[in-house]
Amino acid sequence: MYNLGDKIVYPMHGAGVIESIEEKEILGEIKKYYVIAMPLGDMKLMVPIDNADDIGVRNVIDYTDVNKVFTVLKQDTEITELNWNKRYRKNMDKMKSGDIFEVARIVRNLAFRDKEKGLSAGEKKMLNNAKQILISELILAEGSSSDFMNSKIEDIIEKN
């Protein structure tokens, strides 16, 4: 169980801070929810406490793992010759896992593919979503701003 102020990751939405724990009645059933304030987009999520583990909620990476994420972004791109539809589904499964290193690989690989061949509209949206998920966790782990982190990621991708 997480507590107020804990920094956690909700797969497919990114990282945020538990702002409160509330009870809500939905369909006649009272359940407790984490209310998570997301640093990007001023969004708040309500996650049922009972389902948090099943959904894949986890703690934000620590500061030492931030450099490992940057290392993943700097590594050589993995080129897959799957058609865009299969590549999209494979990447979506990786994003759903909530693994920050997989999200970093998606950002790296799609950014490279976008520069080389271009992306489908769906993959462009996925690249933007993956980048936002990555940024949200890195700014909470490192204590930096979204503008700084976005610039840092863009610089790494440009140099790769």
Image: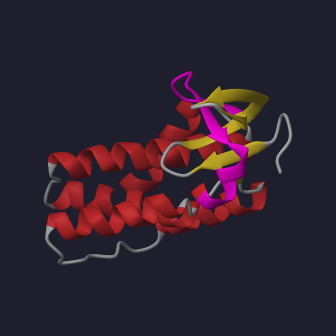
Residue 30: percent from left, percent from top:
71, 33
Q: Is residue 6 left or right of residue 81?
A: right
Quadrant where the image shows the C terminus: bottom left
Classify 39 as above or below 140. Answer: above
Residue 132: percent from left, percent from top:
47, 41
Q: Is residue 119 left or right of residue 153?
A: left
Q: Residue at x 54, y 52 (%)?
A: 11
Classify 80 as above or below 140. Answer: below
- Looking at the image, the residue that sits furthest to the front is 28
Q: Residue at x 32, y 69 (%)?
A: 90
User: In the image shown, does 111 or 45 lie closer to the viewer?
Assistant: 45
Q: Is residue 71 left or right of residue 111?
A: right
Is 107 in the magenta?
Answer: no
- Looking at the image, the residue that sits furthest to the top is 42
User: In the image shown, does 34 or 151 lie closer to the viewer?
Assistant: 34
- Looking at the image, the residue that sits furthest to the right is 3
Q: State the image quarter where residue 91 is shown.
A: bottom left
Q: State the image quarter where residue 143 is shown.
A: top right
| Residue 73 shows in this picture | no
Residue 64: percent from left, percent from top:
76, 61
Q: Residue at x 57, y 67 (%)?
A: 71
Q: Is residue 21 left or right of residue 150?
A: right
Q: Residue at x 51, y 46 (%)?
A: 133
| Residue 5 shows in this picture | yes
User: In the image shown, does 115 or 39 lie closer to the viewer?
Assistant: 39
Residue 59: percent from left, percent from top:
74, 54
Is 42 in the magenta?
Answer: yes
The stretch of residues the image draws in magenta is 35-54
